[in-house]
Image (spheres, grey):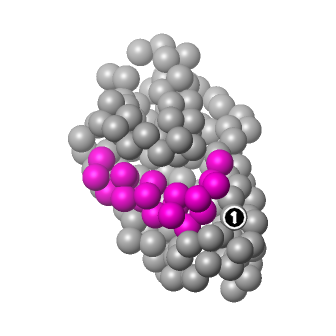
Amino acid sequence: MTIETNKAILDRHFNEVLNQGHLEVVDEIYTSDYTLDAPVRSDGSSQARGLTQGREQLKQRVILFRAGFPDIHFDMDEIIGERDTVVVRYTYRGTHLGPFAGVGPSGRSIAITCILIAHLIDGKIQEALSAFDTGELMKQLGC
């Protein structure tokens, strides 16, 4: 796959999966053994980093974020590709209207800047590392 193709796959991740909630796209652009290492665990807890393993856990993670922040929107601020790796600096924004990470709805708006490093194989995302400041997220939620 070309670097541009890999970048386009990450664009689909952010726009179709995260922003629009099209969970069927997960089966198209992720390997079956996909792994995500990220601050908020797939069960919604934020006490420790956790792995999201496989497509179904990723779908649950997307549902979790979209339930906590129904108006959530991810902006890709910068994207860099090299061979089978794509790095995206992104910002997600939303209004906390549902339970999230053990915190009840606060009605507060959040804006969190993050980094995602994704490794692709044969045109699908195989693994990713997401990094963002969970302390800042909790502060913006009023915790």
Say if the magenta span includes residue 70: yes
Q: Quadrant of the N terminus?
A: top left
x, y percentage for residue 88? 62, 39
Whether residue 128 sits left or right of residue 99 in the image: it is left
Whether residue 22 sits left or right of residue 96 in the image: it is left
Q: Give the residue at mark 1.
A: 95
Q: Residue sitting at 33 percent across and 30 percent down?
A: 28
Q: Is residue 63 visible?
A: yes
Q: Label 1: few (<14), some or many (≥20) within 10 Å?
A: some
Is 49 rendered above or below residue 35? below
Q: Quadrant of the C terminus?
A: bottom right
Q: Which secondary structure type mostly characterizes the magenta part of the structure? A: helix
Is 135 rendered above or below residue 69? below
Say if the magenta span includes residue 64: yes
What is the three-letter code of the residue carrying label 1?
A: Thr
Q: Is residue 112 visible?
A: no
x, y percentage for residue 82? 55, 25
SS assignment at label 1: strand
x, y percentage for residue 96? 65, 69
Report the front residue among 108 and 118.
Answer: 108
Q: Residue sitting at 56 percent across and 36 percent down?
A: 15
Q: Which residues are magenta?
A: 55-73
Whether residue 103 sits left or right of residue 91 in the image: it is left
Task: Residue 11: name its quadrant.
Answer: top right
Q: Residue sitting at 73 percent across and 64 percent down?
A: 110
